[in-house]
Amino acid sequence: MILLKDIYNEEFLSSLAKEISIYDYCFNQDNFIKSLINNDWERRELKDRMREITVSINDHLTATTLKGKIEILKKTSLGITKCKNSGLSLIIFPDFIEKYCEEEDYALAIPALEFFTSIASSEFAIRKFIEIDQTKSFIHLDKFSKSQDYHVRRLASEGCRPLLPWANRLNNLKNNPEPIIKILENLKFDSELYVRRSVANNLNDISKNQPDLVIKLLKKWKKQKVDPFIIKHALRTLLKQGNVDALSIIGIKTDKKDQKYSIKDFSLEKKQINLGENLVFSFALLNLEPNNKIRLEYGVHFLKKNGTLNKKVFQITTKDFEKGDFPIRKKHLFKDFTTRKHYEGQHMIELLANGRMVTKINFDLKIN
């Protein structure tokens, strides 16, 4: 199996060293590579490898000023994009800015991150400078949100996500996201899905701590005919929580008197499965009125190491159903991931319709 960390391999390092040497004639390619490919290299994970490369670049560049080093790396980054190993691996360039630019280098760092983000996203690196000076940073983010370059516009949103995965949390913005909202207002009608998805992800982050703010904003955006994708994607956490206001925004009737459907015949193919197998389940939806929008989900209550259960919700479908009887069959693969380890014992699966639990069944998971 190819691991993500292996984007940083000897072939990539050779291509990188060769490209740097075009603009830094005294750059020692062999020493640079040897400093990295050692006994510890295989044990290092993705972010550790990235940072080791960043440090070694700094150690081997012969430019004597930070500005000079950044200029070499700008030229290098444009050339290295032609190599087959480019892509995520090029995040080393904004990482260099994060590592070596401090508060006194702020005026140098921000334009560099704006430059590099078109090559490899600066979303992680820019957070350091938001924490250094939030007010000044949001002036720049506002300008970025109006850029002709959609990569830069996305940085305006993605860089200030309060809960960006793999990154440090921006606690000031988690508690008071108002500065973010001003940026997202600039981007809500963006022509690029890449940017609109970031807007939605940012709002989903905010919803985990400020749900009322997001609900109020998206009610307004719906009236303004903002892309329904943004609205639904931004609400995904609240929808999984069965939030009544979120369900209402996407057109789901939540009052029990409006419930014109029923769920029947919920069953499991097997009530005992082994790790690596699918839990197969089926049920029927009886819908009593035409064009009835229904959200169907299932929740798996995973057994934790301490014996408690942890529920995770998965969507089956959200759509307008015609009147009639609809058989549905689904499966869920039980396999260990880096984000979830399974434990032997009794689990539970439940069906949810429009945010409400309808029925549930226990089942056993065996670890081979």
Image: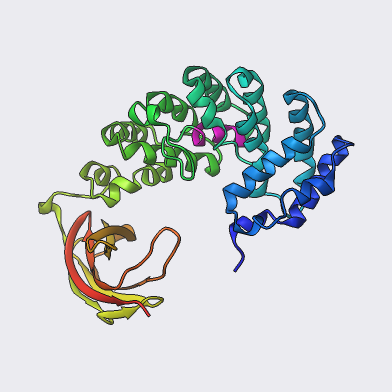
Q: Position of residue 99 (x, y in %)?
A: 62, 33
Q: Does the magenta stretch include residue 154?
A: yes
Foreground residue among 40 and 191: 40
At x 25%, y 61%, the residue is 306
Residue 121 falls in which quadrant of the image? top right
Foreground residue among 322 and 163: 163
Is 330 drawn above or below residue 36 in the view shown?
below
Q: Where is residue 166 in the image (x, y as percent from the top left)?
A: 49, 45
Residue 332 falls in which quadrant of the image? bottom left
At x 28%, y 61%, the residue is 297
Give the magenta part as a residue range: 151-159
Number of numbered discs on residues: 0
Q: Point out the image quarter for the N terminus.
A: bottom right
Image-based side of 43 in relation to 204, left or right: right
Q: Position of residue 80 (x, y in %)?
A: 77, 45
Is 303 drawn above or below residue 223 in the view shown?
below
